[in-house]
Amino acid sequence: MRLFNNLGLTSKVVLLVALLGALSIIITLYSMTSLHTVDRDYRALLDQDAKASLMISAALLDLSDASRMVLSVLTEQDEGSMRVTQQLLDVKQKEFEAKLSSIAPLLKNADQRLEDIRQKEEQLFELAHAVIDSAARWRGDRALRIIHEEFDPALSAMRRDMDFLRNSAVDNFNNTSQELTLTTHRTLFNTTIAFTLALAVIIGLSAYISVTQISRPIKQLTNAMARLSRRDYDHSIDYTERRDEVGSMALALRVFRDSMQRADQLEREAIVDAENRRISQQLIDLTDAMPGAVFQLRVAVNGDQQFVFLSGKSERYVGPSLADKQHRGLRLDHIRINHSLEHLHELDLAIEHSLRNLQPLDIEMQVEHGNQRFWLKTLATARRTEDGATLFNGIWLDVSEAKAQAHALENAKEQAEQAAHAKAAFLATMSHEIRTPMNAILGLAQLILKHPLDTRQQNHMDKIIRSGHHLLGIINDILDFTKIDGGHLVAERIAFSPQQLLEDIHEMLEEKAQSKGLILTMKSETDLPVLMGDPLRISQILLNYTNNALKFSEHGTVTLRLSLQHEESGAPILYGEVEDQGIGMSEQEQEHLFLPFQQADTSITRRFGGTGLGLAISRSLAELMEGSVGVHSQPGRGSRFWFRVRVRLPDAEAVLPSALPVPLVAEPRLAGLRLLLVDDNELNREVAREFLQEAGIKLDEVEDGQQAIDVLKQAPTGTYDAVLMDMMMPGLDGLNATRMLRQETRFNKLPIIAMTANASKQDASQCRAAGMDAHIGKPIDQALLWQTLVQLCVDRTPVAEHPKDQSSRIVNDEPILDPMPLEKLRQLVSAERFASMLTMLVDDCLQRGRRFSELAGAIDLQTLRQEAHDLISTAGHAGLRRLEARARTLQHTLADVDSRDISQLCLRISDDVQASVYTLKKHFKISDG
């Protein structure tokens, strides 16, 4: 509104009147133009849509006339009359077509429908001619059938289409009329509003000019004078740009304000200078009181460094000689004694990264002051100055003690890992040594069952076999106790009968209960269904509970119960309990009951024996199956131990395993085979010899891998149908012997079957990787042995380690992330360092995922082996369990060189990478930015 500032009052009034006249003219022109347009459109609507409706009605009358003509021929007896009617029908068709042609320009967006009507019209009149021809030749019956079956439906369809056109024209007329009416009303309404708004604008402008140009300026200048009297200079003086009397007053007032303000400014500067000196001294005192040394470092654009400020304690960390150089080019990267290339590069990278991205600086360097060396931690923030330099504001801290603690913690971690590896090796050896005699026990027992026995002997042998197999399961679980602590043990998901499981435990321990004069009973729901879960671990929990109940009971009854419960979500839960009438225990004794190597009372070990490990294993196994354990007990009144584990209802294809490992008779097709048995244990060879020779198989025996290689090389090709190879043997073991055999072409297709006491999944994978065709654990499962021999030696089909879907299911059962390794790392490094390492891990995983996607299309075995090996290492150290398991599966599959499986596994690894990265970001709260 600067225009009004330079106009007189008369000019302003004339301007307002002119504006009012111009608005009135514009509004009048708008109203007349809009009404003229409405009138024109309404006349066009009457001329077009009304005419179209009338033409459609006339066309419908033509159709009615045509229909009447067709029907009239049915009453005609003279063929000449019929032909006359046929000529009239042609005339009517032309009239109808002429009306359609007239309708087409009158209707919009109806071309397609009119074309359809023309096609139907031609068909209709052809049918009409057909009716007349039929009536002329064969009289009424055939013509009448054409009318009913073809002509009438075609006529009805034509009338519907014509009615639709007419209705469309009528609807368009009505809609357009309504729109024109609305346009008229809108024009009148807009005209009224426009006149009202124009009047309001003129009134508003008049009020605005009065307020802004006269009363308000004078009032503001008056207020400004009052503020100056209070020495308030924060508000500006307005209206100095005006050319009237108000502008002159404002200019004079501003000169007066500037004079007063300059005088006050000089007084304030003197006060501020004194306060600055006081604050500077206060900051120096505060920095000297801090635990570290404070510094301010300026890094110029060309890289020159200068310490702008060093607190008093800086001499303690960098020495007085360096501290004195703060104005003579002392550099941050000179304050160290470790000059190795690795440390120099790390320090340079940290400073360069902070300079480039203005990220906080967090570095550690070893320094020397006097005769003392210590670790100095530098923490600093960076900001850019106006001249382009970078200013670091930071602090130095002595972290020598923290470094020593971290070093001690790392040493302790390495020692713990070495102890864990030693324990794992010891447990593997123990497993092998236990399974070797157990193979003989169960093998000989199964051989005895092949001979005639009375009922009592048969029963005893069944119990020996059943107990032996269960003992093997318990041995496996005890040897896997360390896996439970490490979270590496995975529960199985197989079909089992809870009722059969309860009966097996009852039968196994019934004789023990009777020997102590106890009654062992079992109770379960009558309709307890087949379930999916881990029956071996469930039975171990029940066995631990029942053995304890029998151990601590002198009289009464021990009751085993199983029932199926459901959570609120509907998920099935298997609930089991063992109740006894034994010695019981107090609440204090129950607190430590499920801890490893703990018993309710130290006297219990002396009286009843035991290590106190069984209940701890039971708790760990229940938690492994997403369940829990507990006990209700009172001293002198017995105890009730319970557990709850998560199970599933079986799939349709789930197969219930047999309750007992019944010895199977070998197939006759195996008779005549010749095998080479490689085992250093004479008793194991004797058991295998009995099995194989009874099946009609010829057998040669050697004691180690080197003897096996010598025998095979000396024998002609094809002498042996297969080799049964032990893993652990003195001299050359089974794995290395297999690798050496596979290096020779003549032994590439020779079936080599691992038959060993090393029965874990890792052992089976090692056998596959070494080139063996199958793996059979000891004690020998005869059914599996016969099946494997038939497949490899008779049918000549490969034996898969696991079905592909089962292998995928096993990998998918692995947790995506085990956070423990990274959580331990987080405790050893700073938060910034840990965040940086996580970012590097995520980037590395994503890069590897893209790499495997590329390799899925162009398989390079050598590159894949290296990539799989690297991924196993990276994922294993980071706790990415599923990704590690998938990479190991790929590593094993590469030995088979099945390109389809390899491609699928590469793509699955790429998917697992995305899932792992998502889980990492979610667990450690990593933002995408």
Image (tube, helix red, strand yellow):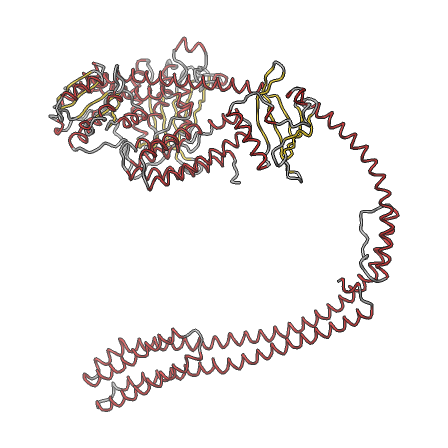
Position of residue 558 in the picture relative to residue 827 (left or right): left
Measured along the vertical axis of the image, is residue 635 above or below residue 198?
above
Residue at the outermost right position = 229
- Seen at 53% across and 77% down, the residue is 177
Quarter residue 451 falls in? top left
Position of residue 108 in the picture relative to residue 520 (left or right): right
**Percent position of residue 341, x then y:** 51, 25
Measured along the vertical axis of the image, is residue 747 above or below residue 6?
above
Residue at the outermost top position = 606
Q: Closest to the observer: 459 or 646? A: 646
Q: Closest to the observer: 24 or 595? A: 24
**Percent position of residue 151, x then y:** 28, 78
Q: Closest to the observer: 75 or 576? A: 75
Q: Closest to the observer: 328 or 506? A: 328
Looking at the rendered image, the quarter that the N terminus falls into is bottom right
Quarter residue 333 falls in? top right
- Seen at 25% across and 29% down, the residue is 658
**Percent position of residue 286, x then y:** 72, 26
Q: Is residue 457 visible?
A: no
